[in-house]
């Protein structure tokens, strides 16, 4: 896909297990949920294919099982809003070989939702506030870098909930 309209159409038509491949870089003008189905067992892969997807001040919400990967090199997701990625409850986001950068607050945000899984492999995550802001969720970092902003109180990974327990929140490196 080479445009926001083509991406939205491909997400709507995608069956579980499908891969959507970017053929050009483009910007989002509206937030998008991937996969789009309310079926939380649906799995979708977005291959950046060396391109940049700029979310501007919008959000990509992972609902179900979303994998974002790069089959070549240089694939990036950038944004300037509150978060680039948000993960819904009963959902997972896997980043493999990509760069995610937010000049807004967070590159990735989980909120205080249940049954969230985030897996990072060979990826670079940078947020101007926090790279990853976790309310609840299980985070696995296989390889890569996670950075927060330079200001006081900014972290690569922030666990923000005072109600987090080992059952609903963990970090594995």
Image (tube, grey):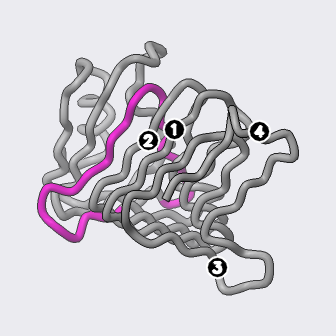
Q: Residue at x 36, y 52 (%)?
A: 95
| Relative image position of residue 101 (x, y in whole percent) | 47, 68
| Residue depicted at x 44% and y 13% | 39
Q: Position of residue 94 (x, y in %)?
A: 38, 45
Q: Cβ–Cβ below 8 Å for labels 1 and 3?
A: no
Report if residue 81 lies within the magenta region: no
Give the residues drawn in magenta, as a range.
56-76
Query: Relative to residue 132, is residue 9 drawn left or right?
Result: left
The answer to whether 152 is drawn above or below residue 28 in the figure is below
Furthest-right residue in this view: 162
Q: Marks 2 and 1, how far apart in space?
A: 6 Å
Please indicate whether residue 113 sits to the left or right of residue 84 in the image. Answer: right
Alpha carbon separation for disc pair 3 and 2: 22 Å
Is 149 positioned to the left or the right of 122 in the image?
A: right
Disc with the residue nearer the chain's start (4 vs 1): 1
- Kindly state the secondary structure of the residue where label 3 is placed: loop
Of the numbered discs in the image, which one, if any, rests on residue 165?
A: 4
Q: Earlier in the sequence, mark 1 or mark 3?
A: 1
Marks 2/1 in contact by CB < 8 Å: the verdict is: yes
| Residue 93 circle label | 2
Asked which quadrant contains residue 76, the reply is bottom left
Q: Residues within 10 Å of mark 2 (few under 14, many from 20)?
A: many
State the residue position of label 3: 149
């Amino acid at each position: 896909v080479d445009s926001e309209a083509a991406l939205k159409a491909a997400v709507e038509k995608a069956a579980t297990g499908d891969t959507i491949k970017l053929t050009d870089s483009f910007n989002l003008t509206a937030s998008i949920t991937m996969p789009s189905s309310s079926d939380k067992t649906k799995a979708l892969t977005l291959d950046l294919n060396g391109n940049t997807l700029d979310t501007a001040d919008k959000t990509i919400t992972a609902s179900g099982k979303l994998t974002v990967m790069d089959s070549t090199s240089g694939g990036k997701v950038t944004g300037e809003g509150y978060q680039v990625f948000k993960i819904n409850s009963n959902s997972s986001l896997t980043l493999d070989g990509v760069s995610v950068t937010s000049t807004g607050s967070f590159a990735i945000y989980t909120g205080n939702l249940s049954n969230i899984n985030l897996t990072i492999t060979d990826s670079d995550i940078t947020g101007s506030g926090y790279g990853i802001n976790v309310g609840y969720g299980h985070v696995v970092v296989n390889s890569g870098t996670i950075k927060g902003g330079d200001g006081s109180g900014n972290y690569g990974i922030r666990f923000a909930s005072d109600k987090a327990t080992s059952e609903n929140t963990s970090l594995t490196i």
